[in-house]
Image (cartoon, helix red, strand yellow):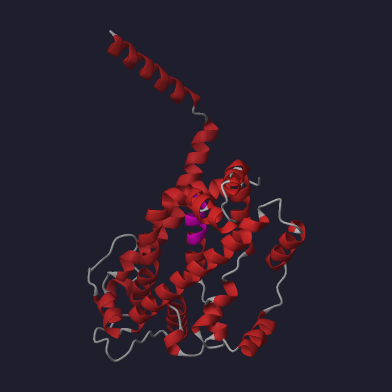
């Protein structure tokens, strides 16, 4: 009798939930579905082109399903070696950049989140100022030249490790989610500020740290403008800039060439599609592991405390 009663109750609740679905909910679901398609379909199209035959791609007959499946473009890229080197180099730069960026972000946001910091408003304004105003490319180039970091790996790391936007999100998270009572108890027990940060604050801030780490990593991975302006050596070019050069050369001359080590030849469009997949896959692999933290951290850190 009890089981039957529970089933009827659950059925009744399900019926009420369906009755509450209105036209607005349906419209929003359709809009979200279409927005998802705008993200998914281009990726599927590129993936299909990357494993299709040259003839099918040139005939513009490849849409969402590959035709004449082969992996010649991937073989060309692997045999060439320069793209593989750029990917490994980009991964190292991205990891170092993300680690240093998080250290700078935490060390800036934590003191600014404390009311006991004297001159907090002035320092907050000082650190937020670069978010609204920038000197421009030419002053940046002259500054990097004077610092001696032009055409070095450090020009890709040091200038961007501080992000005012990320700092603001982390500062807001600290203020809204770390109770002052925890820190007061730790201070009474003789803990220093550094011990409080490492042993109390950071363990409670995993969602926002994962979120901002993803922001840093994706931002560095997708950026190529600083490569274009400040890097000349081929071995210091990140994979996104290599991809940009490949697409630009194919657009201008209708040819995309790799080194002589690449024995397998593919058309420019197929090579471009395979290169795009090579560049995109690392981020796709990392994202699922951070997704649960990313959603929570983005929602909490975005609410001003």
Say which quarter of the image contains residue 148: bottom right
Residue displayed at 42% across by 87% down: 235
* Residue 214 visible to an observer of this rendering: yes
Residue displayed at 65% across by 47% down: 304
Image-based side of 72 in relation to 37, left or right: left
Q: Residue 190 appears at what percent x and percent y? A: 57, 51
Q: Is residue 253 above or below residue 19?
A: below
* Residue 62 visible to an observer of this rendering: no
Residue displayed at 56% across by 79% down: 226
Residue displayed at 57% across by 88% down: 150
Verify whether residue 122 appears in magenta.
no
- Which span of residues is magenta-colored? 207-213
Residue reaching furthest to the top: 1
Verify whether residue 208 appears in magenta.
yes
State the residue in front, 151 or 21: 151
Image-based side of 265 in relation to 188, left or right: left
């Amino acid at each position: 009798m009890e089981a039957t009663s529970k089933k009827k109750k659950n059925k009744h609740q399900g019926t009420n939930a369906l009755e509450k679905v209105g036209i607005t909910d349906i419209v929003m679901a359709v809009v979200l579905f279409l927005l998802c398609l705008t993200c998914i379909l281009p990726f599927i199209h590129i993936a299909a082109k990357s494993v299709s035959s040259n003839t099918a791609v040139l005939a513009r007959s490849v849409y969402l399903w590959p035709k004449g499946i082969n992996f010649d473009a991937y073989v060309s890229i692997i045999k060439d070696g320069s793209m593989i080197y750029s990917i490994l180099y980009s991964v190292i730069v991205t990891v170092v950049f993300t680690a240093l960026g998080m250290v700078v972000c935490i060390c800036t946001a934590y003191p600014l989140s404390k009311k006991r910091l004297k001159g907090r408003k002035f320092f907050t304004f000082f650190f937020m100022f670069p978010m609204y105003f920038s000197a421009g490319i030419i002053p940046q180039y002259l500054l990097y030249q004077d610092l001696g970091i032009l055409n070095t790996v450090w020009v890709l790391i040091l200038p961007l490790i501080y992000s005012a936007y990320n700092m603001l999100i982390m500062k807001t998270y600290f203020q809204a989610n770390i109770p002052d009572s925890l820190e007061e108890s730790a201070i009474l027990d003789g803990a220093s500020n550094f011990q409080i940060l490492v042993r109390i604050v950071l363990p409670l801030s995993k969602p926002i740290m994962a979120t901002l780490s993803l922001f840093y990593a994706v931002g560095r991975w997708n950026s190529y403008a600083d490569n274009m302006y400040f890097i000349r050596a081929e071995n210091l070019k990140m994979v996104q800039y290599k991809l940009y050069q490949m697409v630009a050369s194919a657009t201008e001359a209708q040819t995309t060439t790799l080194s002589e080590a690449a024995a397998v030849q593919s058309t420019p469009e197929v090579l471009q599609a395979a290169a795009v997949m090579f560049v995109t896959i690392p981020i796709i692999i990392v994202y699922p592991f951070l997704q649960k933290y990313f959603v929570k951290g983005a929602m909490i850190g975005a609410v001003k405390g």
